[in-house]
Amino acid sequence: MEQQESRKNGITEGVIWKQILIFFFPILVGTFFQQLYNTVDAVVVGRFAGKEALSSVGGSSSQIINFVVGFFTGLSAGSTVIISQFYGARNKERMHKALHTAYGFSIAFGIIFGVIGVLFTPQILRAMNTPENLLADSALYVRIYFAGLIFIVIYNIGSAILRAIGDSKRPLYYLMICCGINIVLDLVFVLIMRLGVLGVAIGTLISQGVSAVLVTRTLMYRTEDLKLELKKIRIEKELMLTMLKIGLPTGIQSCMYNLSNIIVQTSLNALGVDTMAAWTAFGKIDSMFWMMNGAYGIAVTTFVGQNFGAGKYDRVKKGTQICLAMSAGCALLFSALVMPFGAELFGIFTTDAGVVQTGLRMMHVISPTYFLFTFIEIYSGSLRAQGHVLVSTIMTMTGVCLLRIVWTTCIVPNGTLEQIVACYPITWVVTATCMVVYYFYKQKRILAEHHAV
């Protein structure tokens, strides 16, 4: 019993850097499997169903799916923060109400947005200038995806709740299981049954359904101090509004990231095929940093949320700074490792010397400055965990997203490669500077308010 109590209270009582790492690694590996999960469909149809099927699963369809997943992942942050605070405060009654409210609105949102997506998929694809010969298969894939949106939302909410109470391992295990199911089903439906795009869509739908069932079953039967009861699922208005107050700005921020990156992509497309190919390859290398950075962001949100709820404000401050040091250190190490081996890394994706040289030009501008974004990720995550999200979100949307759009469309229209990709380090410098100033100002006020109570 004592061992269980110690394990359960690790985030609020254990050695800070150890607790952050214990939480961080499963999230990092889980993010890798999430990326693998999302690319399996494209690999299978590309290899066995032809380039038209690959274009239908990728391209516009992929952008729509990334947009939707980013929004609902951000939205789940509201549940993470509220439940982690209640868990840290040992407020079981409010924690249970928050759990059932989170499930209630995830079911409602999944159904409503799923129906809207199914109905309007063709119009969305046409608005994105999807080629007519790809429209039917693209619409089929996206519509089946939207039909299973409720499973995606439930898995994201359920995983967020498990992480909020300090369990980052089981969401990883479930993701690994469902990734394996998805691979097997894709191969069966495409390679054996010859269903093409329909096959990978059905495989994804089934595996997402399994992930939703697994995480829901865990919350019903296998979590201490937290029990989901289906008959008690209902939306408490006050709690839902609080969750939306935190989660909605985070979801919109994620959508803005996607939008700004599409604008940058459009500017780079004008520079030709070599640049497009190099940017695609760089995106795969670049994604390794963002997996790591995002995992630290989730870790600091849970750590700060639980300690804030427990009233351990000294651990809130120390935990934030330790997580920042760890994240920035990893970012600098990552830059130091990829920069000398850039040519070899690009060589994994292409043998074209021109593409490799173009990719190296991108890498030399962006990769040395990764550490700047850790200030944005960690400080905004810490403030979000304390219930203060609006100003940091507006700051990030303006400094990173809008400034990036202004840079590429107004400041350097028809710019060189270096001028276009410079929008990344420039916007990180501006936003990180503002975030550091705001964090220390706001953190001082938050702690003053709570010490006064």
Image: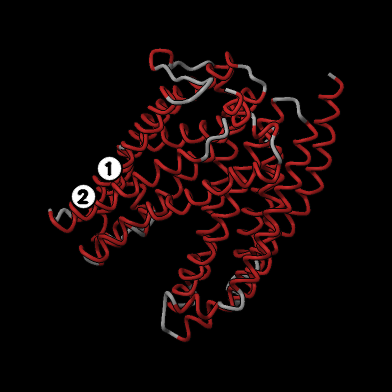
Q: Residue at x 38, y 29 (%)?
A: 112
* Residue closer to the observer: 15 or 81: 15
Image location (x, y in percent) of residue 362 = 58, 74
Q: Residue at x 31, y 36 (%)?
A: 209
Disc 2 + disc 1, Cβ < 8 Å: yes
The type of colouring in the image is secondary structure
Distance in Å between CA atoms under marks 2 and 1: 8 Å
Q: Quadrant of the C terminus?
A: top right
Q: Residue at x 49, y 81 (%)?
A: 356
Outermost residue, front side = 2
The residue where tag 2 is placed is 198
Is tag 2's residue or tag 1's residue first in the polypeptide sequence? Answer: 1
Q: Secondary structure at mark 2?
A: helix
Outermost residue, left side = 193
Residue 390 seen = no
Kindly identify the amino acid type of the residue bearing the numbered disc 2: Leu
Image location (x, y in percent) of residue 100 = 48, 19
Above or below for 47 versus 433: below
**In-image side of 17 versus 218 (left or right):** right
The residue where tag 1 is placed is 144
